[in-house]
Image (cartoon, rainbow, N blue to C red):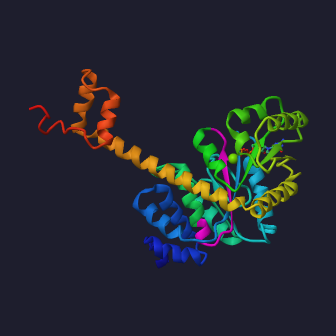
Amino acid sequence: MAKFRISDPSALLEVARDGDRVALARLLSLVERGGDGSRSVAELAFKTVDQAYTVGVTGAPGAGKSTLTDHLITLGREQGLDGPDQLAVLAIDPSSPYSGGAILGDRVRMQSHALDDGVFIRSMATRGHLGGLAVAVPDAVRLLSAVGIPLVLIETVGVGQQEVEVAAATDTTIVVVNPGWGDAVQANKAGLLEIADLFVINKADRPGARETRRDLDLMLDLTDLGTWRPEILETVASTGEGVEELWAAIGRHRRQLIEGGTLDEQRRRRLTREFHQILMARLEHDIDRLLAADRFAGITGAMAAGELDPYEAADRLLSGMVPDPDGPTPDS
Ligand SMILES: Nc1nc2c(ncn2[C@@H]2O[C@H](COP(=O)(O)OP(=O)(O)O)[C@@H](O)[C@H]2O)c(=O)[nH]1
Ligand SMILES: [Mg+2]
């Protein structure tokens, strides 16, 4: 039991690499929480050369993402990307229940299940992480890679800019829609059309799948596509119909990325974007702190009095020329 009291990240990582899921869960908690702990985990994990392959599953609430992901877990375990292997699931959608491996709200049971069958499932929030999900999720993926997990499934609800960004930042992005008039159009509006590598029309047991396929095809025709035209698949996640074909399509997309050399290129681009997010988050944090300081009440006062326009105030602030309201004034 002594080892469970370890809190030093590098010691935890060492234990996690030997397959200790409790240690891994603890490291992921550090990542979620942000701050110094998260920083040292990120630093350790960043040195990992073999990055896990990431598959994003996104779409509106109720589209069937979790049910579909459940099947992908099974297929991932049985077939893997290059043969059966362990895998991890990050559920960013807080309403995700998994029948196979996990029950949310019962973390202990969830982790022991993961220990049994090589599936590590974790729901993720960001709590204090500066930069939010867009920074915390890549950190988590690198951590999972660092402990030797080759495949990470990431379920996000495709609503809101942050979630869409997270969904987009995966090697293969699956957008789940349902049959029926307008669903494809909604997905387009949410910005999901541009990020999709594969479309899944789930609940294909319901009427309207053909129309949804036609809508998607029409929208794809109007989109400036790269070398890969997103495939459109139909599934009935509740029975498992079509999920084997989906797994095969994931494999095709992955092969295309690897053979075309675009996998590395995409990952480099994502890293640049991540760096941008980190810088933005830091600056925002610093600015908030500056503005909260008493001495800056003077600036707000000067702006309110019409003595200083906001652009001039920003110029001075950014060039470090903002006069200290508590110090001597330039013309005194
Ligand atoms: N009829 C039908 N229902 C499905 C199908 N896939 C999922 N469902 C049901 O749709 C509901 C929402 O599924 P869930 O996987 O939780 O959706 P999520 O919110 O996108 O993760 C559940 O009651 C599922 O049983 C399907 O292919 N056909
Ligand atoms: Mg779900």
Magenta stretch? Answer: 144-159
In the rendering, at what x and y percent does residue 25 appear?
A: 55, 65
Nearest the viewer among 3 and 266 is 266
In the rendering, at what x and y percent does residue 27 appear?
A: 51, 65
Nearest the viewer among 150 and 71 is 150
State which quarter of the image contains the C terminus. top left
The answer to whether 113 is drawn above or below residue 209 in the figure is: below
The answer to whether 69 is drawn above or below residue 52 in the figure is: above
Q: How many marks?
A: 0
Residue 141 visible, this angle? yes
Q: List the single residue furthest toward the left.
A: 332
Nearest the viewer among 77 and 186 is 186
Seen in the image, is 170 located left or right of residue 219?
Answer: left
In the rendering, at what x and y percent does residue 258 appear?
A: 75, 63
Residue at 26%, 21% (x, y): give it.
306
In the rendering, at what x and y percent does residue 127 appear?
A: 48, 50
Image quadrant of residue 265? bottom right
Seen in the image, is 178 located left or right of residue 61?
Answer: right
Seen in the image, is 236 located left or right of residue 44?
Answer: right
Based on the picture, tell me whether residue 160 belongs to the magenta stretch.
no
Residue at 58%, 64% (x, y): give it.
142
Residue 89 visible, this angle? no
Seen in the image, is 121 located left or right of residue 139?
Answer: right
